[in-house]
Image: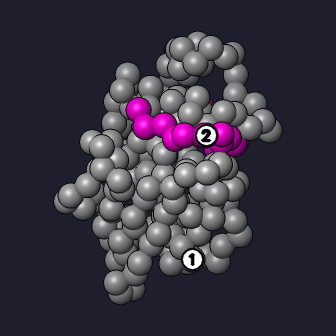
Amino acid sequence: MRTHEGEGRYNGAALNSFLLGLGHSDALVKKVLNDAGVDTIDPGRWYEINWAIGIYFAIAEQIGRAAIIAVGKKMIETAPFPPIDRNIKSLLMSLDAAYRLNAEGPNIGGITTEFHDDTSATSVWTSMGPCPLNIGIIQGCCSKLGIHAIVEHAPGECMDKGGASCTYHISF
């Protein structure tokens, strides 16, 4: 699990995405909460960032890649997002601002997106969560606009394997 040095906090509303993503199984939700040492996640509270991000890593490690992608897909339904126009470019460009609405502290990373044409983009993430969570976030955001996006991890670095960033090719 990646951690960052220093203080930081993570929004409980964003962390609640795992409740929706795993909502099909009360037993899984209870296990994740129990393993984290809590009974519930308060969406109005801020949590210590390494503890909060650790929940996402635990889901990825214990339940699997598909589960953490499902959690990422629900992020736009639970986490604060900046106002956006109803177009894909505006939405993808707002991902860094959305991340910063939900994660605070020094050295927490960020998200940059570059468009190649009207149907593709490349997004570079240095955020703290597991790589499949990021893929789910991108897919969930696009789905919110009724767009089916294909998100592929680019060759090269992956933060889950010790790299400094993850790069995603997005086709929509």
What segment is highlighted magenta in the picture?
1-21
The residue positioned farthest toward the bottom in the image shown: 117
Task: Say whether residue 161 is left or right of residue 43.
Answer: left
**60 falls in the magenta region:** no
The residue positioned farthest toward the front in the image shown: 6
Residue 72, percent across and down? 49, 46
Q: CA distance from mark 2 to mark 1?
A: 32 Å
Secondary element at image label 2 = loop
Name the kind of residue labelled 1 in the image. Answer: Ser
The quarter of the displayed image where residue 154 is located: bottom left
Residue 95, percent across and down? 55, 64
Q: Residue 108 got which mark?
A: none
Task: Say whether residue 57 is left or right of residue 50.
Answer: left
Please state which of the two labelled residues, at mark 2 or mark 1, is closer to the viewer.
2
Q: What residue is at 58 percent from the left and 29 percent from the top?
A: 51
Q: Residue 6 got which mark?
A: 2
Q: Quadrant of the C terminus?
A: bottom left
Q: What residue is at 44 percent from the left and 72 percent from the top?
A: 113
Q: Quadrant of the N terminus?
A: top left
Q: 89 or 154, which lies in front?
A: 154
Q: Earlier in the sequence, mark 2 or mark 1?
A: 2
